[in-house]
Image: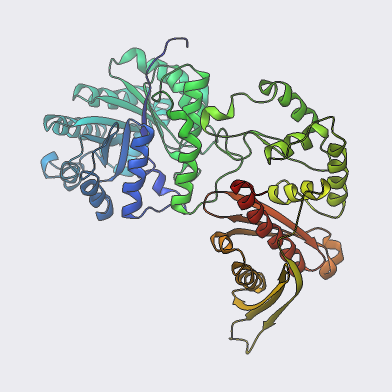
Amino acid sequence: MSERRRIQIYDTTLRDGAQGEGVSFSGAAKVHLALKLDEFGVDYIEGGYAGSNQKDMDFFTDIRRHTLRHARVAAFGSTRRMNTPVGEDANVVRLLEAETPVTTIFGKAWMLHVTDVLRTTAEENLAMIADTVRYLKERGREVIFDAEHFYDGYKDNPAYAMAALRAAAEAGADCLVLCDTNGGSLPHEVYDITALVRRAFPTPLGIHTHNDAGLAVATSLEAVRAGAIQVQGTINGYGERCGNANLCTILPALELKMGLQAMQPGRLKQLRNLSVFVDDLVGFRPDSRAPYVGASAFTHKAGMHVNAVQKNPRSFEHVPPETVGNERRTLVSEGSGASSVLLKAIEMGVALKKSSPEVKEVLEALKEMEKQGYAFEAADASFRILVQKVLKQHRSFFDLDGFLVTIEKGGKDEPCRSKARVKVRVQDQIAETEAEGDGPVNALDRALRQALTRFYPEIERVVLTDFRVRILDPEEATAAKTRVVIESTDGRESWGTVGVSGNIIEAAWEALVDSMEYKLFREEEESGRA
């Protein structure tokens, strides 16, 4: 694979990805994502099913108002219906009305679908394929033919599956895409069949796979190895059932592992940002364990591993994280060694040397805190505050004089009302505020924020993005100790904090205080006052 072969990237997030459970794009979001994909450098953007709904047709109109720098927009549709002249088929007409430079049509390559789903003859299905491809080509479109269920069809009836491809190729299709629509084919099967097709047809080949057997990335790469020059997939693997082939995993594999050219130089460094952007667009929490782009993809915890990475990152990282726009992270726990603590402290901006006695002090404090139930893996900000306290570099921005949280419930059909009163002291001044919230923690957060904003206006920018509770000793029932982890952001930076107590409100308060103090410390640090 030393030859720098060019691979086309065909993104179908807006069409096939939108069929995934919980995935929905507004009209504006579709345009926003298309522009982002074009900026990233994909070759094709499949905008939607032209004959399916008005929102997709509106997208084709809206995207024409923008000048794309790289990508070509494709409208998706089916072959003509059986026993219908192609020029009179409503779906084919809609494909032309989309006015896209590319049309992608799917046709049946598996006799089971021809007889049991379409309920037509083998000959009519082949005519449907050929008529539609020819009709669209005669009207100046680039035509991509998706041979639906091709691999299942080939394993069932090789001659007919190949006949479906031949019908499209002879009618002028620009690319024949072999589809593992049920997602159940194995990598070696896809390689063998794709290689056979490659020898039989001069027309360029593409691959479109689903992830029902967890193999969509592997089968896509095997098809490329066998000669396919186009890969279809979605960002983050969105798609029906178990999803489509994940381009966020396929792209770095093509570029960094197989030596192929799938992106313009430098674009791969935008991969993680694109992945997070798309998750945010549909309201999904990013998969921290996603290969290459996940927050945990280059995260190290075991002491020996951290020590090895410190000496040579290649020892436990298969690619440099920065090549895909990610970063290395170190986790600390009671099992961490001095190397882990040192690297994590440096990562958080604390200047330490491994020979420094403070490293041992931090490690001992960390182990003591974890005995009490604290965990700092998702609480970087609390870890930094812990380090600062051990080094005697921490100062409190405010002190608590007290808080009161009440929950009131009327009749059974009445909602609970939560109210919090907070009294804090900043130097020699006292602020006492009261606020209601959707729950006791929300009320406490609002009251604390109101009290502090008088002294620290920057607190207004802090937003809580996540709140997680874990019961540490469930055998104690209602007396169990509780760990609360809070994630916060100011729009530029995100951070996590942790609190532990037998009282969930006190644990939440502790995490809230760390969150606010971390924000204030960062403000001082950036302004040079810390």
Where's residue 320, x and y in %?
59, 25
Query: What number of labels is visible?
Result: 0
Would residue 171 be found to the left or right of residue 516 on screen?
A: left
Residue 358, quarter of picture: top right
Name the residue at 86% across, 47% down: 365
At which x and y percent is residue 156?
A: 41, 28
Residue 140, relative to residue 228: is it above or below?
below
Residue 184 in view, yes or no: no
Q: Which residue lies furthest to the bottom in this view?
A: 411
Foreground residue, 48 or 263? Answer: 263
Q: How is the image coloured?
A: rainbow
| 499 relative to 247 in the view: left or right | right
Residue at 59% from the left image edge and 74% from the top image edge: 438
Identify which residue, 221 or 359, lies in the foreground. 359
Front residue (pair 125, 237)? 237
- At 40% from the left and 25% from the top, the residue drawn is 263
Residue 318 percent location from the top left of the image? 62, 23
**Which residue is drawn at the image coordinates 75% and 56% (left, top)?**
395
Question: Can you name the residue that lies furthest to the top here?
Answer: 2
Q: Where is residue 90 in the image (x, y as percent from the top left)?
A: 17, 48
- Left or right of 323: which side holds 40? left
Q: Quadrant of residue 133?
A: top left
Task: Say if residue 109 shows up in the picture.
Answer: yes
